[in-house]
């Protein structure tokens, strides 16, 4: 139990569907992250939020739309995805963006696009 | 790209110490070395991190060479549950990357009975 909770743990969606992944952290942190892990590839950073403001978008396609309503919650809205978007999506949080502050990960949401 | 080099796989006997090496020859003076592990189908688990000095916690020890160009993660008494992919990460300097974690391919540690 890391204090970062992701729901749903598993999601299957069609290419025309709209769905959302949810992340909640109970650590009092101010920075939150979305990472993507495709099969046999290293984890890739997607988005970074600090104090609810997006500070980094790692050239992510617009079919992925993040939302951070407060420092404890982070969403990833999904729309018209492709089968190659099937992956493990990981949420993480840290106290802030300082390099000495540990980043803690959730258990991830497995997404399958059919 | 990741700034670290790790062996792709290692084996360790149960109950023995597991020593996982990592090279980070281009590390800068203000960059931390972080270790995470990932058990299949789960999110990465934080293990330990350090800047210059050796560090120890309830999970592991981190030994950083004096020139900081390499480090070793030590699991003192490996168990079967320690079988995982272990990632050594240099947390990049502030700026455009905001000090984020850049994951490489890691070392697949197999603990055997």
Image: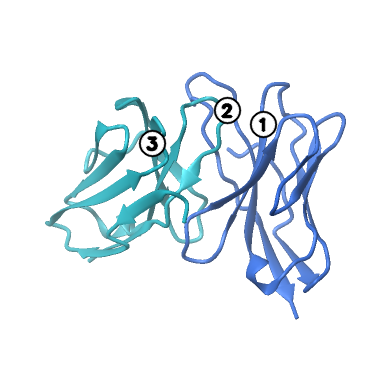
Query: Chain coloured blue: which letter?
Result: B
Left or right: A27 in relation to B75: left
Give the vertical position of A98 relative to B80 (above or below).
above
- Describe the element under mark 1 as helix, strand or loop: loop
- Describe the element under mark 3 as helix, strand or loop: strand
Q: Which residue is mark 1?
A: B32
Q: Residues within 10 Å of mark 2 (few under 14, many from 20)?
A: many
Q: Residues within 10 Å of mark 1 (few under 14, many from 20)?
A: many
Q: Which residue is mark 2?
A: A99
Chain of the residue under the numbered disc 3 shown in the image: A
Chain of the residue under the numbered disc 1 shown in the image: B
State the separation of the CA atoms marked 2 and 1: 7 Å
State the separation of the CA atoms marked 3 and 2: 14 Å
Give the vertical position of B108 relative to B57 (above or below).
below
Chain of the residue under the numbered disc 2 shown in the image: A
Q: Which mark is residue A98?
A: none
Question: Which part of the image, by quadrant, shows the C terminus of chain A?
Answer: bottom left
Q: Whole-percent x and y of residue A8?
A: 27, 60
The reply to whether residue B42 is in sight is: yes
Front-most of residues B14 and B31: B14
Query: Chain coloured cyan: which letter?
Result: A
Q: Residue at x 77, y 74 (%)?
A: B14
Q: Which residue is mark 3?
A: A32
Mark 1 and 3 residues: CB-CB less than 8 Å, in contact?
no
Most extreme residue toward the right is B66
């Amino acid at each position: 139990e890391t204090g970062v909770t992701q729901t749903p743990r598993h999601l299957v969606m069609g290419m025309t569907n709209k769905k959302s992944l949810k992340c909640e952290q109970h650590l009092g942190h101010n920075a939150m992250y979305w990472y993507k892990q495709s099969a046999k590839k290293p984890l890739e950073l997607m988005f970074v939020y600090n104090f609810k403001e997006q500070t980094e978008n790692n050239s992510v396609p617009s079919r992925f739309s993040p939302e951070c309503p407060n420092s404890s919650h982070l969403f990833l809205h999904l729309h018209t995805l492709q089968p190659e978007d099937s992956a493990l999506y990981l949420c993480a949080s840290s106290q802030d963006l300082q390099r000495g502050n540990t980043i803690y990960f959730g258990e991830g949401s497995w997404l399958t696009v059919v | 790209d990741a700034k670290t080099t790790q062996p792709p796989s290692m084996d360790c006997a149960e109950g023995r110490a597991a020593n996982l090496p990592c090279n980070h020859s281009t590390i800068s003076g203000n960059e931390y070395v972080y270790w995470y592990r990932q058990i299949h189908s789960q999110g990465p688990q934080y293990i330990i991190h350090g800047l210059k000095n050796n560090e120890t916690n309830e999970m592991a020890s981190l030994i950083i060479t004096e020139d900081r160009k390499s480090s070793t993660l030590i699991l003192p008494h490996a168990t079967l549950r320690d079988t995982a992919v272990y990632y050594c990460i240099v947390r990049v300097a502030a700026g455009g990357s905001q000090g984020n974690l850049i994951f490489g391919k890691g070392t697949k540690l197999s603990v055997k009975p």
